[in-house]
Amino acid sequence: MEYIISVLRKKRNGDEQYVQSFNYETSSLETSLLQVLININNQYNEDIAFEYSCSQKKCGACSAIINNHPRLLCHAKLKDYNKEIRIEPLRKFPVICDLIVDRSILYDNLKKLKLWLDEDADASEKNNELVYKSSECILCGLCLEACPNFNIESSFYGPSSISLTSKIVLEGDIETKNKLRKEYQEHIYNGCGRSLACVNVCPKKIRIDKLLVNLNGLSIWKKR
Amino acid sequence: MKAVNIIGAGLGGLYLSICLARKGIHSNLISQMPSERAQSVLGEGGINVAIGESDSLDSHIEDTLKGGAYLENKDNVVQLVNNAKDIVEDLIKLGVPFERKNNQLVLRNFGGQINKRTAYSKTSTGKMIMTSLIDETRKYESLGLINRLSHHKCVDVKIDNNEFKYVVIKDLFTDKCYNLTGTLVIASGGLNGYFEGSVTGSSLNDAYLQSSLFSNGMEFKNLEFIQYHPTTIDIKSKRLLISEAARGEGGRLFYFDDNGNKEYFLEKKYPDKGNLMTRDVISREEYMFMQVGKQVYLDMTRVDANKWKTTLSDLRNEVMDYLGIDPIKEYIPVTPGIHYFMGGINVDINHKTSIKNIYAIGEAASIYHGANRLGGNSMLGALVGAKVVSKTIEEKVISESKIEEIKYEKKAINPLKLRQIRNILLNSMGIVRDENSLKQSLEELDKLLDEDNTIYVNFAKAIVMSALNRKESRGAHYRSDYSESSASYKKQTIVKFDKEIKVNLK
């Protein structure tokens, strides 16, 4: 099977993005696009830059836009596509080089939310399952890419902040909840347009909508 | 400002930065990518803590020593085990959702141990611990005690007269380089880079730093001991791990005999521990069957149905997602894959290396696991190392840390050569080794030597020479030409570069 893989590239410190296309022939359709890029670099002696670490959907490094859909390169397989595959960097973040983007905003927003426990966690097991689900977020940024309400200048911190806030609110004491309430209202609750695009693209299948409902109950209405 | 420089933001580095911050000590946490991308998030089965009713610290110590083929110094293992309870309690306070019932930890069975001893969070324990630790780090970041330097790679280390001088780090976003002085802690993980494509871990652990430290005279220990995990699957770009929890929760390994009957070979041969024998033993058994053309399968079809909804739900999702196999109904074909490096930087019980002002923790260090690591002891080892270093380092002994921009140029290693080095190592450092193939590897490595890859080739040679020097079989090191353990080799392999590569037993 022959594919045409097009990559939207940009030189480090360069201004212009440009498309470079490669013919890629293989019989192994289970191959991930991450491995395809590694193979192209080897085969064509290229230096396409992209981030990756775990190669199995657990670290969130290899986010990209594939044929206009945000996905993890390690989770997208050749068999998912027809002949032409176009790989681009995420569009909402500053491009550093080729497919590498600066996702610092993800971390900065969590810091601005003051997202940490001030006291020991409430370790009662009743919340275990929800805490688990909330902790699964890998900060890949795909939900921010898909979200119609998020951009890096918006006061809305985006869906990724929702799942991690959920963890802290579930485990935090009353002071922690009080600390988060105002920030939550302003930067999450008011900004989310309930499009649920985040739920569709989340590689961990986190039901951000459910966490949000639960979070609203815990942090907005229940003052104690 | 006085600060500790930590290279690597995985479990060890992250916990160290927290422990130091609790004492009011500043740290720079340097990593190529943020902690969310570290190998530690792949940690699956759990963390050993001997708090079960019939369990004891002594039993955990003995299992760890025995699992490691009695190579490790007992004092080190005692330190590992004695810290487990406090650390797990700390993790619970930090919000890790360990499986609990009536507010007591639920423990699961794991390899090489009869007692239920492994605390867990489904089969994503590493991810759960990392999420909680990262939350905690954020608190100290806001206080200015932790400086997370993500997207920075350590590209060089300067050592003079056995004393650490400075490291060079490169900002991977801007390409600018900086000098960093101060106390240094290496927490950069295992040697995956030498075996990329054949490991279960992260490609970030490229071992570049280790090879650089080796060429600068740092002592390394037991590099011949490489853990092959018995249940992995080739998914083209890497080996996908099926957690040992699969067997801890009732999974069984078998092959089809010549009459087409399922042969549960481990249960027959090892009636005591069966499918939960140590990883070195099971991988070797599998290898022998593979040699005669037999495929080994993991059979989870008789696992208690409830577990699929609870403790094994994420394992099932992953197997279905990446392999298209539903483990409730189908058998999973498995082979051994490289999972962990017992060898690494030689450290004393306080995690001090042979170079003044440099410490090492986590998989980068060799201290707790002897010739073969028990499942459930690796995350424990990383956390204990962090705790020990944070106690060892007193503020008064930390040197001034300055970050200074410098000009730094170094030619990168040719990727083709790197692939050749990997292939050579894979050929001779498999589950079964012998003198001929090891010697042949050394010759091939010598032929590859050029100006730009000396550092890389030298460290690869150190790995092979360590294996060549150990003329016995012990733990994960199996020599077909010396198939028995020998009392005279119950010593640590110490390898060091001093004008040439020198291997000694100590």
Image (tube, rainbow, N blue to C red):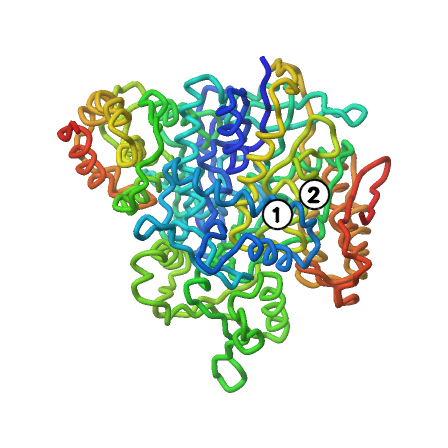
Which residue is more in the foreground, B33 or A95?
Answer: B33
Can you say which quadrant of the picture contains the N terminus of chain A?
bottom left
Residue found 55% across the figure and 39% down from its top: B204
From mark 2 to mark 1, how far is it between C-alphas? Answer: 42 Å
Occupied quadrant, residue B58: bottom right
- What residue would you read off at disc 1? B78
Residue B325 lies, with reference to residue B289, above or below; the image says above
Residue A115 on image: x %, y %: 33, 27
Residue A103 lies, with reference to residue B453, above or below; the image says above
The answer to whether tags 2 and 1 share a subunit is yes
Can you say which quadrant of the picture contains the C terminus of chain A?
top left
Residue B277 on image: x %, y %: 56, 66
Which residue is more in the foreground, B4 or B287?
Answer: B4
Residue B45 visible, this angle: no
Give the crowd class for mark 2: few <14, some 14-19, many >=20 residues within 10 Å.
Answer: some
**Extreme residue in the bottom direction:** B259
Look at label 1 and name its amino acid. Answer: Val
Q: Chain of mark 2?
A: B
Disc 2 and disc 1 in contact, CB within 8 angstroms: no
Occupied quadrant, residue A43: top right
Q: Chain of mark 1?
A: B
* Residue B66 shown left or right of residue A171 in the figure: right
* Label located before the other in sequence (2 or 1): 1
- What residue would you read off at disc 2? B417
Look at label 2 and name its amino acid. Answer: Lys
Which label sits in the foreground, 2 or 1? 1
Residue B285 visible, this angle: yes
